[in-house]
Structure formats: C-alpha cells, structure tokens
Image (cartoon, helix red, strand yellow):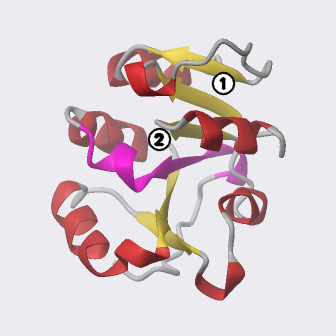
Amino acid sequence: MKVDSVLSGISPKGTVGVGIDVVLAPGARKEITKLGKIRDIVIVVPFAVRSPVEARCKHRLPQIPYRIYYENEEEVSLMEVCIREKISISVACWLHEAISLSRVGVTVLLFNTAYNQSELSLPWNVTRMHGWDKILENILLEKY
C-alpha cells in the first residue's frame, strides 16, 4: 500500500489515527479491520522503524485501505499529521502521546495499561478504554 494512498467517499471527520504499536497489539487485527470498513485509518510510525512496517501492516490489515505517515520524515510530527489529516479520534497506548494529541483537539481513546498510569488527571478529551471491543463499540455508537 502506498503511503499517499487516497480514500474516496469518507468524510475527513471520520478519520481515526492509530500508532503502529496499536496496530500490532494482540487482538487489534479483527477490530481495526471492522473500524476500517466505516472510518478512514491513518497509521503514524516513528521513521526509524520504517522498513518492517509496511510489510507488517499489509499482512495484518489486508482488507482495508489506510495511509501511513512516518514521524520525523520531512519534520512531520504526530500532531501535524493529526491536523493535516483532520483526525478527530486517535487510539493510543502511550500517555505522553495521548496528552500531546489532546492539545490539538483530538479525542484520544487510551488503552488502560499498567505502563501508562499517572497520578495526574487526564485532559477532558482523553478517555481510558479497556480493550478493542470497547473502543470499537464507542466509535460505532458515535460517542466519539
């Protein structure tokens, strides 16, 4: 799949951003495939891990269209991708990413894991989720 592949007929408001760590997480394949049938998917990847990513995504997500952006390539940041692609929802694993994305108005569905806990309260537009089934359910019900 080409990095700049274009989807037609899907509103930019329907764009969902996911990190490569989310795509490769256990249980993600089935749920992202379902999500990809109703929303535009943009995958954001650190530039340093470029070579194995395209093959892994092609293998794990063969039935849905998506676009891949590489952070730090041409000085593109995660937040710039969200703004450029009009990403309204992002699924994240890392707390620091969730907080950064919330600052540019993105609603973040944050996996509730042991490694991303904090004593600080989360921004209003960051919600902890327990698994892909809950994430998909909330997006399908258009809660986000």
Q: Dot 1, crowdedness within 10 Å: few (<14), some or many (≥20)?
A: some
- The part of the chain drawn in magenta is 11-25
Q: Is residue 12 on the magenta stretch?
A: yes
Furthest toward the front, the residue is 119
Label 1 belongs to which residue?
A: 144
Measured Cα–Cα span from mark 1 to mark 2: 14 Å
Indicate left or right for 6 with 107 as reference: left
**Relative image position of residue 53 (x, y in whole percent):** 30, 70
| Closer to the camera in the image, 32 or 52 | 52
For image coordinates 68% across by 24% down, the residue present is 126
For image coordinates 60% across by 18% down, the residue present is 118
**Relative image position of residue 19 (x, y in whole percent):** 46, 51
| Closer to the camera in the image, 17 or 103 | 103
**Relative image position of residue 64 (x, y in whole percent):** 33, 57
Indicate left or right for 138 with 124 as reference: left
| Closer to the camera in the image, 19 or 29 | 19
Q: Mark 1, mark 2: which one is toward the viewer?
A: 1
Residue 138 seen in the current view: yes
Label 2 belongs to which residue?
A: 38
Identify the image quadrant of the C terminus. Answer: top right
**Relative image position of residue 110 (x, y in whole percent):** 53, 27
**Hey, what amino acid is under mark 1?**
Tyr
Mark 1 secondary-structure assignment: loop
Indicate left or right for 30 with 6 as reference: left
The tally of labels here is 2
Q: Is residue 106 on the magenta stretch?
A: no
Mark closest to the chain's N terminus, 1 or 2: 2
- Residue 143 higher or lower than 66, as above or below: above
For image coordinates 24% across by 74% down, the residue present is 52
Residue 141 seen in the current view: no
Mark 2 secondary-structure assignment: loop
Q: Quadrant of residue 101?
A: top right
